[in-house]
Image: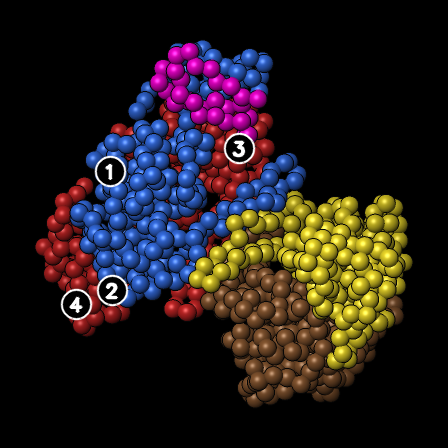
Chain colours: A blue, B red, C brown, D yellow
Amino acid sequence: MDTSAEPEPVRYGDIVLIYIDERRRYIVRVEEGRVFGSDKGILRLDELVGRPYGSRVKLSTGVEALVLRPLLDDLLSLAYRRRSQVIYPKDLGFIIYIADIAPGKRVLEAGIGSGFLASAVASRLRPGGRLYSYEIRKDMAEIARRNLELAGLLDVVEIKVADVRSGVEEKSLDACLLDMPDPWNALNTAYNALKPSARLVVFVPTVNQVEKTVVALRRHGGFTDIHAVELLLREYQVKEGSVRPSTRMIGHTGYIVYARRV
Amino acid sequence: MDTSAEPEPVRYGDIVLIYIDERRRYIVRVEEGRVFGSDKGILRLDELVGRPYGSRVKLSTGVEALVLRPLLDDLLSLAYRRRSQVIYPKDLGFIIYIADIAPGKRVLEAGIGSGFLASAVASRLRPGGRLYSYEIRKDMAEIARRNLELAGLLDVVEIKVADVRSGVEEKSLDACLLDMPDPWNALNTAYNALKPSARLVVFVPTVNQVEKTVVALRRHGGFTDIHAVELLLREYQVKEGSVRPSTRMIGHTGYIVYARRV
Amino acid sequence: MDTSAEPEPVRYGDIVLIYIDERRRYIVRVEEGRVFGSDKGILRLDELVGRPYGSRVKLSTGVEALVLRPLLDDLLSLAYRRRSQVIYPKDLGFIIYIADIAPGKRVLEAGIGSGFLASAVASRLRPGGRLYSYEIRKDMAEIARRNLELAGLLDVVEIKVADVRSGVEEKSLDACLLDMPDPWNALNTAYNALKPSARLVVFVPTVNQVEKTVVALRRHGGFTDIHAVELLLREYQVKEGSVRPSTRMIGHTGYIVYARRV
Amino acid sequence: MDTSAEPEPVRYGDIVLIYIDERRRYIVRVEEGRVFGSDKGILRLDELVGRPYGSRVKLSTGVEALVLRPLLDDLLSLAYRRRSQVIYPKDLGFIIYIADIAPGKRVLEAGIGSGFLASAVASRLRPGGRLYSYEIRKDMAEIARRNLELAGLLDVVEIKVADVRSGVEEKSLDACLLDMPDPWNALNTAYNALKPSARLVVFVPTVNQVEKTVVALRRHGGFTDIHAVELLLREYQVKEGSVRPSTRMIGHTGYIVYARRV
């Protein structure tokens, strides 16, 4: 973590964001001899080394680009492989907030999918915290591992290829996040793994899953303060004297059910 | 940070959540001889000491209550004093995500208001991180200080009664969060304080402020990747066989404008 | 229907809208000797007779009021009795449009409830058109009858206290509107009563009813072009330099399912 | 208007809807010797004549199609030429409702654009009613005329190529609908043309236009009961056991401002 006033220089091995314009943003690893190519021109990555982050560089065509340090959100939206439906920023943010994800917390997740939620959580757990991610599909676990490695988060996450519905070893956890088709079958697992007062957060795409989850939570008896919500994000087109929401919009991603263990 | 499997006991001095039902949730500090009162009965707080969190206790009337360890969200919604318009969870979560708030980061905020955003951010910065919160109103700064103290977050936050529009001393920060009436007058401050690639996030209640902020960001030249969004949260009423959104809804809180420094 | 250029005068027997301010709007019938009273003063209604609609009059206190000819929407929102959940303007408008309600059309409705939808439809069917409204509850039918009488629409509507699920006599209708708990039990009725190509429109409050209705429509085989939608209405607070959506919003009224008979 | 129980037969000259599936819906005029072609096969239109509406016919490939009588909404969505931004059903319905469009009413509109709003209104004014549509662009007026002719609505509409901002001859109208870039410049026209109590309804795409319109309405003094709203339409994907909103959504069409003349 750099907290000094001096801009950091790019080094070999760094993951950088090459920003040409809003539609042309690329994540690349700076390696010796490597050449970055786009429809706007190419760039020898050796040229970047030693320059401070935030520098403007010229592509072979004279077009300018910015060399930026990627945020986690850049990695997720530009570089992560997606083999499953992923969770969007509006939902990631709400889950992080409502599950009280913070440094030092120990968190259970199932399934890991492509690792988007795992990354958003894991990056906020250091030091001392830990994410236990269960995934029944080995291939998905592998995709997630590669994505987390790219973001440098593998040390915080323990990926287990196992069925969360059969129970987990971890105890006294601070939060449990379920992104799976039948979360109602994992409520005992969640109950046994969570501390009292800790939040269980469930992400599901259909109303039917919301219904089954909430009904099962009430029947279980080990949870209270049960809520089901959805978030809609609206983007605006802003020109001076002409502000309006964008015509196209993502109308639905999923619902978030949350409750706390008693 | 407790990470053991044993439930922790309540101790004198603890801030606890007494949960009677969804509408009766109270935050109290456990002090010797103190009595908690509600319309459902009273409780001598001494009785709680030594009991594990998650215990059920009986009020004087026989009504049961749960003794829970409060999450930050509980403190914000139940115990924080509000002297200004506060930021809601849906917006807090998105801001935390999009500003890449994480352990070790150094963040600028103005103004602190009642300290809701400050708390959501500060709780995710330890260890090593720091929040520099500027506030022009001394009385607001005082409210925020009391709220942050309640949440045990004062060590992470440096509250400064000063005008962020006149510039700040901090340099090379990881994020800048503006919740003030005229954020367009603080763009130079933000530009000078932020690292390249770091996010500026602005929260404003009116469309006119969105317009002025976005136009000013474009004119400034030091920011790119400019977005203006709003989030709508819809809560659902779930009964078996009868799922529907709640009739009443918060129709608007504010807009979020975000950009990155180049 | 008055289409002349001269403002019409108020006559005895007229239903008028007395408009004091946005929160003080009253529907009253002008009768000899009657006195209208409000917290802003009283008004002898005899004084209105002969004055043109649109006149300003003074209450006993000197406060001004406008005497306006009510629109149907005024009657619905200010004067209609409500004994059941009513349908809101956003939904009424969409139903009228999608069901192709127009002069001369013959329409089936069940149930009539408080008569809000019946009124919005009936007022657009003259001359030659007709609304057949089935209602199983006699008391509801009576409420609706009184409301329709107030709006002068009784001649267009035939209210039948009967169960639409048992079938109807009418044939070759132009539209069928179902606002009842179990519309899936009325699909045969609708199919037999409708012309080919005519629209069936269903209004239901829960997602579960949407699911059952759509599934039943597909299974029935006599309907195509099946859609399920919901409408959200957002009101704005507009001041110069400060435009924002209202903080409070109706988050849900109901879902509209529509299809066409083949 | 056919109100008999017998299904009507298709005749030469009829405008019919050939419905193959949800994505293949075509409006064609039945003319002697004409052949309808699609990627699913062809159909000699002579074969339709004499068959009742609602019949199933076979294309050359054996694929079945339905022959339906088009609703106005079918014409608008499938057959109308669009040279301007058009108004969507959700907004058309609300405008019809709030402007109290009904048989016999006399209505002012500007501009006519492609004639979508004009059609939705005109089809509900017969008999006796009339729509006066002002349009400054001759080419747009011509497009609208062709569209209205297709729908058989030309007799109800008087299209005038003129600038509504300069005033209109019509007096004592029942409603005024403005779909133009600067409605605030037509408020005097609306005021002079409308009856007291009648509604002015404005459709504009940007928040800035909402602001200017509302501010101008308040300053004018001749209008009261001023509202600014927007409607969002959400479509649902319904499968048994799996109900969810559609992923893609139209995020914005326009805002509706309405007020009443005093």
Residue A158 visible somewhere in the drawing: yes
> Can you tell which quarter of the image residue B18 is in?
bottom left
Q: Which mark is in front, 4 or 1?
A: 1
Image vertical order of residue D31 relative to residue C71, above or below: above
Residue A115 visible somewhere in the drawing: no
* Residue on which disc 4 sits: B58
* Residue on which disc 3 sits: B226
Where disc 2 sits, the SS reads loop
Q: Could you confirm whether marks 2 and 3 are on the same chain?
A: no
Where disc 1 sits, the SS reads strand
Image vertical order of residue B81 relative to residue D262, above or below: above
Amino acid found under the numbered disc labelled 2: Gly
Measured as percent of width and height from the top left, residue C255 is found at 54, 65
Q: State yes or no: residue C201 in magenta.
A: no
Cα distance, mark 4 to mark 3?
A: 54 Å
Span shown in magenta:
A12-39
Q: Is residue C136 left or right of residue B131?
A: right
Name the mark on residue A158: 1
Q: Could you confirm whether marks 4 and 1 are on the same chain?
A: no
Q: Which mark is in front, 1 or 2?
A: 1
Where disc 4 sits, the SS reads strand
Q: Which mark is in front, 2 or 3?
A: 2
Cα distance, mark 2 to mark 3?
A: 46 Å
Amino acid found under the numbered disc labelled 3: Ile
Disc 2 + disc 4, Cβ < 8 Å: no
Residue at 63% of width from left, 46% of height from top?
Answer: D207
* Residue on which disc 2 sits: A221
Q: Could you confirm whether marks 4 and 3 are on the same chain?
A: yes
Disc 4 + disc 3, Cβ < 8 Å: no
Disc 3 + disc 1, Cβ < 8 Å: no
Q: Is residue C223 left or right of residue B27?
A: right
